[in-house]
Amino acid sequence: MALASINELPESILLELFTHVPARHLLLHCRPVCSLWRDLIDLVTLWKRKCLREGFVTRDWDQPVADWKVFYFLCSLRRNLLHNPCAEEDMTGWKLDANGGDRWKVESLPGEHGTNFPDPEVKKYFVTSYDLCLKSQLVDLKAKGYWEDLLDRIRPDIVVKDWFAARRDCGCTYQIQVQLVSADYICLASFRPPPVTMHQWNDASWTEVSHTFSDYPPGVRHILFQHGGQDTQYWAGWYGPRVTNSSIIVSNKMTRKPAPSTTLSDKAGAEEAAPSPSRLSSPT
């Protein structure tokens, strides 16, 4: 008796089977098998089903999506790309670019002359001293799962957030800068607002800083995040700005309309080793 081919199954059954196959396996291993599989895997219906199955959308979802395949991958990769944003692991993951005064320190909320953080899940913060304290992380986007075509053709929005606060009894100055950086460590776009000075006897409330990079140049491979500051009284100890709950998130939103491409399926999951960051000097 001749064996039946899987391709003899109804297309609806094949689509349902593909819904349960990991997305990268679909594109890298299943899509090249034959034209039938290629056409089914390229159907919008499949990627809508996968988004629904993963909980990325609900059945009553009514927001427009330009490309459901891209949307699926952006949703699956979406998370905070900064390590140890809330000081739960002391200074692990952070490069200390400036460590003046009595140096960086980790304290528990609310801290002396401080206030509770809006999110009760956040328990700790980093605090600066009387001389300049800056710390940074350099995020390798390809190491985080984002491949070149996704970054260069789609260019999804990149949302950066940070929180800072002062002590009630001491003034301080807070600063932040974020750079989108190429593979050879050239800055392609940046966010660097003026430093914020808080005066002595302030309300010690927490303030959120937020910036969205949209329609940035192609070629982004790294993100440099740096923040810190110092107190304005020059008091020994840790009276400078407090920072916590920092985040870099590659959004599933695409402000710009993606250009047509045939490389998304071929490059999903492809990763290359990044060169040494010796050419990138941390800004001060």
Image (tube, rainbow, N blue to C red):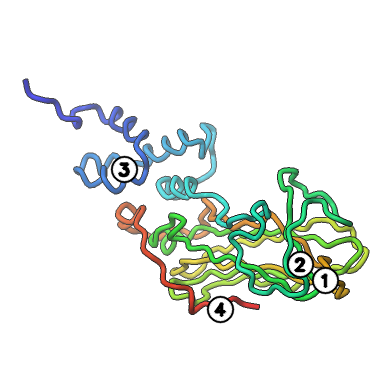
- Which amino acid is tagged 3? Leu
Q: CA distance from mark 2 to mark 1?
A: 8 Å
Residue 13 in picture, x, y percent from top left: 29, 27
Q: Nearer the viewer, residue 74 or 125?
A: 125
Residue 147 in picture, x, y percent from top left: 40, 58
Q: Residue at x 71, y 57 (%)?
A: 244
The residue that mark 1 highlights is 231
Quadrant containing the N terminus in the rendered view:
top left
Pointer 4 or 1: first along the chain: 1
Q: Residue at x 24, y 27 (%)?
A: 10
The residue that mark 3 highlights is 26
Q: CA distance from mark 3 to mark 4?
A: 40 Å
Farthest residue, direction left: 1
Asked whether disc 2 touches disc 3, contact meaning CB atoms under 8 Å apart, the reply is no
Asked whether disc 2 touches disc 1, contact meaning CB atoms under 8 Å apart, the reply is yes
Residue 128 got which mark? 2
Q: Residue at x 44, y 75 (%)?
A: 184
Pointer 3 or 4: first along the chain: 3
Taking 205 as reference, is 38 above or below it?
A: above
- Which amino acid is tagged 2? Thr
Q: Secondary structure at mark 3?
A: helix
